[in-house]
Amino acid sequence: MSDLEETLVLVKPDGVARQLTGEILRRIEAKGYEIVDLKMVTAPRDLLDAHYEEHQGKPFFEPLVEFMQSGPVVAVRVAGNGVIAGFRSLAGTTDPTSAAPGTIRGDLGRDWGLKVQQNLVHGSDSPESSARELALWFA
């Protein structure tokens, strides 16, 4: 039985600014996943509002949207067997300080002590969110 899936990966503005996009993509491909589509965008407010809709009204929502608009984002459509859970494991835990060595966030992330966590990447957390997010970013 095949667990072929697609997921959205975003290289956030901090990853782009630190010139880590190539290293992040290298790790995705080294894991055996396929990059199906890729684009660099400066995300408009309406796209970010839709992407983070479940967080609207929370204290961190506005700072998060401001951070995501602070520079270009690389949006990547990635395919592979079990890629949703696999990429999230490859990315590491949300907090770069506690992310395990060997993960993207554990090896490359920094704890900046900022009001919004700048943790390099986003990966969809379920098949439902993956379908929704891919439709937003790759309409």
Image (cartoon, rainbow, N blue to C red):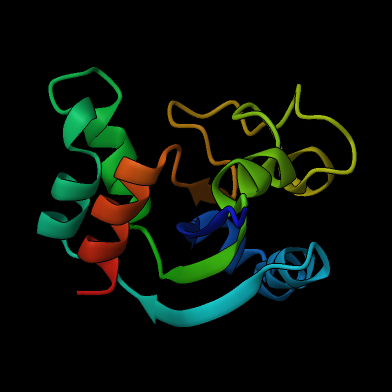
What residue is shown at x 45% (from left), y 37% (from top)?
Answer: 125
What residue is shown at x 42% (from left), y 38% (from top)?
Answer: 126
Q: Which residue lies furthest to the front in this view?
A: 1
What residue is shown at x 16% (from left), y 36% (from top)?
Answer: 53
- Total of numbered circles in the picture? 0
Would you say 41 lies left or right of 59 here? right
* Residue 31 falls in image quadrant: bottom right
In the rendered image of this protein, does residue 61 appear above or below residue 129? Answer: above
In the rendered image of this protein, does residue 81 appear above or below residue 64? Answer: below
Closer-to-camera residue (136/97): 136
Would you say 46 lies left or right of 81 here? left
For the C terminus, the quadrant is bottom left
Q: In this view of the protein, can residue 5 be seen by the observer?
A: yes
Q: Position of residue 49 (x, y in %)?
A: 15, 46
Q: Where is residue 92 in the image (x, y as percent from the top left)?
A: 70, 36
Q: In this view of the protein, can residue 43 be seen by the observer?
A: no
Closer-to-camera residue (87/22): 87
Q: Where is residue 40 in the image (x, y as percent from the top left)?
A: 42, 79
In the rendered image of this protein, does residue 139 appear above or below residue 70? Answer: below
Q: Position of residue 36 (x, y in %)?
A: 51, 80
Closer-to-camera residue (50/72): 50
Would you say 76 lies left or right of 66 here? right
What residue is shown at x 30% (from left), y 42% (from top)?
Answer: 128
